[in-house]
């Protein structure tokens, strides 16, 4: 299945793996790339040395294109941005801001740039700056979320820009991929579905919670601080929501309560004190599988649904 996304990135299937902090490392990224998608390493808040090590490790595990997700609010963003240019990483995705100041440097290094956007305004801004495509992510996704749903956001972004659009948020199978095509996207980005990939090094408790999730198992907190996050309901999330609703608790205390909670979930498997980021499709994920099997199932389902249909994607 060739689309504008597969042609742009030189990949076999129009599927990008989300850049999940503390989760998306060289192991998962290389497995997704070897399976024909685009694997992504998350730079999260790490320094350039850590990210460089993961990039070089990934190159020993795959000869296929892969990317790095750069969180623009990271305290190390300047050094990481420079380092990926030096390493000539094939693709960079960005989140939590506008990457325009880095675009020229990355383009000169031959890097394809795909910012994650949650509005048409940001989509148009990064297009003017020189982005090669945009990832329009709806609020159904795990982690940091915007206000618009994928169903509403994607077609509006498609209408607003001329560059290719990738759909993200609430997509976990072939039906979601076909729906994205119908909205005008040329591919999808998925995070939650890959949490249970065999090659994902996240804690066993994290995978257990995703596999046990139902359709209403996630909730959003953090709106008060301006950084809403979707995660699986547990003791930590309920406590955070209670603190957030209490006007007597200062923002600084709320921020401190969140420090380290994702690491506790992803690396320690702390069921009560961890923040287990996951999207609303968690209830669709029924079993752990190799990344290749996940992608093959998605593509087989999508191709069967699209038999006889010809769309310009």
Image (tube, rainbow, N blue to C red):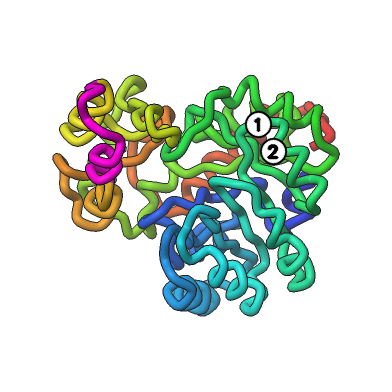
Q: Disc 2 vs disc 1: Cβ atoms closer than 8 Å?
A: yes
Q: Residues within 10 Å of mark 1 (few under 14, many from 20)?
A: some
Question: For the point 54% across and 58% down, which residue is it?
Answer: 70
The picture places residue 170, in percent across and down from the top left corner, at 50, 30
Q: In this view, does 124 lie above or below 204?
A: above
- Residue where numbered disc 1 is placed: 119
Q: What element carries label 1?
A: loop
- Specify the label residue 122 is tagged with: 2
The quarter of the rendered structure image containing the N terminus is: top right
To which quarter of the image does residue 305 belong?
A: top right
Residue 88 visible in image: yes
To which quarter of the image does residue 275 belong?
A: top left
Q: Does the magenta stretch include residue 82?
A: no
The magenta segment is 246-258
- Specify the label residue 287 is tagged with: none
Question: For the point 21% across and 30% down, which residue is it?
Answer: 249
């Amino acid at each position: 299945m060739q689309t504008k996304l597969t042609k742009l990135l030189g990949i076999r299937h129009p599927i990008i793996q989300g850049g999940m902090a503390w989760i998306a490392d060289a192991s998962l990224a290389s497995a997704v790339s070897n399976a024909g998608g685009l694997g992504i390493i998350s730079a999260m808040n790490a320094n350039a040395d850590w990210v460089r090590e993961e990039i070089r490790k990934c190159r020993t595990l795959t000869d296929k294109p892969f990317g790095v997700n750069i969180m623009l609010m990271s305290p190390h963003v300047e050094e990481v941005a420079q380092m990926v240019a030096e390493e000539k990483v094939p693709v960079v995705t960005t989140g939590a801001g506008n990457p325009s100041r880095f675009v020229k440097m990355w383009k000169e290094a031959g890097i394809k740039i795909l910012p994650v956007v949650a509005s048409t305004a940001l989509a148009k801004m990064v297009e003017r700056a020189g982005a090669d495509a945009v990832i329009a992510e709806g609020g159904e996704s795990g982690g940091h979320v915007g206000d618009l749903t994928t169903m509403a956001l994607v077609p509006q972004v498609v209408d607003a820009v001329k560059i290719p659009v990738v759909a993200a948020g609430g997509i976990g199978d072939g039906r979601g991929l076909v729906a994205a095509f119908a909205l005008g996207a040329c591919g999808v980005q998925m995070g939650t579905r890959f949490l249970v990939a065999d090659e994902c090094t996240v804690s066993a408790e994290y995978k257990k919670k995703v596999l046990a999730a139902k359709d209403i198992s996630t909730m959003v907190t953090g709106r008060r601080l301006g950084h809403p996050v979707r995660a699986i309901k547990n003791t930590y999330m309920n406590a955070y929501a209670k603190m957030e609703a209490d006007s007597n608790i200062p923002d600084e205390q709320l921020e401190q309560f969140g420090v380290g909670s994702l690491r506790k979930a992803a690396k320690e498997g702390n069921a009560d004190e961890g923040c287990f980021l996951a999207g609303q499709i968690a209830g669709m994920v029924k079993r752990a599988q190799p990344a290749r099997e996940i992608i093959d199932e998605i593509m087989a389902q999508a191709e069967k649904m699209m038999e006889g249909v010809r769309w310009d994607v």
